Amino acid sequence: MMNEIPEKLITAIKKSRYVVAFTGAGISAEAGIPTYRGEGGLWDKYDPNLYANIDYFLQDPSYYWNFFREVRYPLLKNAGPSQGHLALAEMEAGGNLKTVITQNIDGLHQVAGSSSVVELHGTTRIIFCMNCSQEYTMDKAFSLLMEEFPPRCSKCRGRLRPAVIFFGESLDPHVLRSAYEEAGKCDMLLVVGSSLVVYPAAEIPLVARQKGATLVIINKEKTGLDHEADFIIQGKAGDVLPQIIQSLRE
Ligand code: NAD
C-alpha cells in the first residue's frame, strides 16, 4: 500500500546531520517474527511471561529451551531481513543514518547490513555458559540441545543461557549509555515498529525529543508517544521505509 510521505519529512531528513533509528518488534513482523502484541498460534502456545522471565528460567530452564527448539531457532534460522531492515541498512550506507538502536533480539539489522547497532535487549544469536562464559552460536547451541536437554556447556558442563535481557533483569548500563548517547546526539529520531509502551526503552525517543531532535514515528498503529511526534506515518515499515529511500534518491 502506498503511504503519503510528506515532502517536508524528506527535506528534514536531508537537512539532518545525525539521524538515528529506534526500532521495535514491528520491523521484524514482516520478516515473519511475531510481535508480542500480535496474534499467532505459536505465541499463544508459548507464553513470553514464562519463556522470557529470568526467575522462571533459573527455576526451570526447560520451558525456554523447549521454546528455543520449537519456535525461536526455526524462526530465526529461516527468517531473512524485512524490507524495513534492508531500507535502514541502505540509509546507513548512503550516509543518511548513523545508528540503529533496537529493542529486538533477533539480530536482523546486522543480517541486513547495518553496522552500527545498539541492541538494548541483547541478542538471541549468542548463547553463553553461565559458569565459564564460553560463547556459542545458535547453531551450536541447537546441536548441544539435541544431545542433551536442557543443554550444557561442552567445556565445563555449566548451564547455558541466551545473551538477552530477560523480564526481571536490568538492561546492561553500558549498552543503555550508548543508546542515551546516540539519542542525545541525534537531530532526528526515526521510530519504527514500536508501540513505545515498554520502559525504559521508550524513554529513548523522549531523550532525543528533549534535546531538540525531530521525532518521526512510523508504525502500523497508534503509539504511546504520538503526541510528541513531529511526523507520524501510520503504515507498514516495509512499505514506508523503501518509499522514503526512493524519495531521498529523487
Ligand atoms: P510491541 O510488540 O510492543 O509493538 C510492536 C508495534 O509494531 C505495534 O505497535 C504494531 O502496531 C507495530 N507493527 C506491527 N507490524 C508492523 C509493521 N509491519 N510495520 C510497522 N509497525 C508494525 O514491540 P516493541 O515496542 O518492540 O516492545 C515489545 C518488546 O518485545 C521489546 O522489549 C522487544 O525486545 C520484544 N520483542 C522482540 C521481538 C524481536 O526481536 N523480533 C519480537 C517480539 C517481541
Image: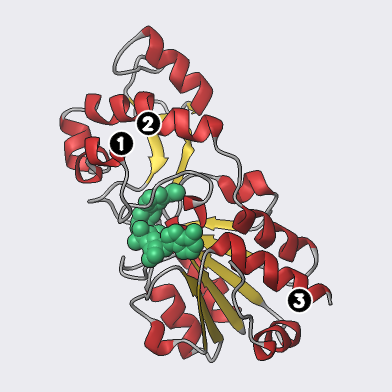
Q: Quadrant of ligand 1?
A: bottom left
Label 3 crowd (10 A; few <14 / some 14-19 / many >=20): some
Mark 3 or 2: the one toward you: 3
In which quarter of the view is residue 46 placed? Answer: top left
Vertical arrangement, residue 160 with respect to residue 123, above or below: above
Q: Mark 2 and mark 1 in contact (Cβ < 8 Å)?
A: yes
> In the rendering, at what x and y percent does residue 89 appear?
70, 57
User: What is the distance, in whole Å, between disc 1 and disc 3 at their CAs?
Assistant: 38 Å
Pick whichever, 191 or 203, lies toward us. Answer: 191
Q: Which residue is depicted at the point 56% across and 87% down? A: 213
The image quadrant where one finds the C terminus is bottom right
* Mark 3, secondary structure of its residue: helix
On the image, the x and y values in percent for residue 178 come to: 53, 65
Residue placed most toward the observer, 167 or 134: 167
Q: CA distance from mark 3 to mark 2?
A: 38 Å
Query: Taking the image as drawn, is residue 175 in sight?
Result: no
> Is 64 situated left or right of 230 in this image?
left
Residue 197 in sight in this render: yes
78 left or right of 204? Answer: right
Circle 1 residue: 42
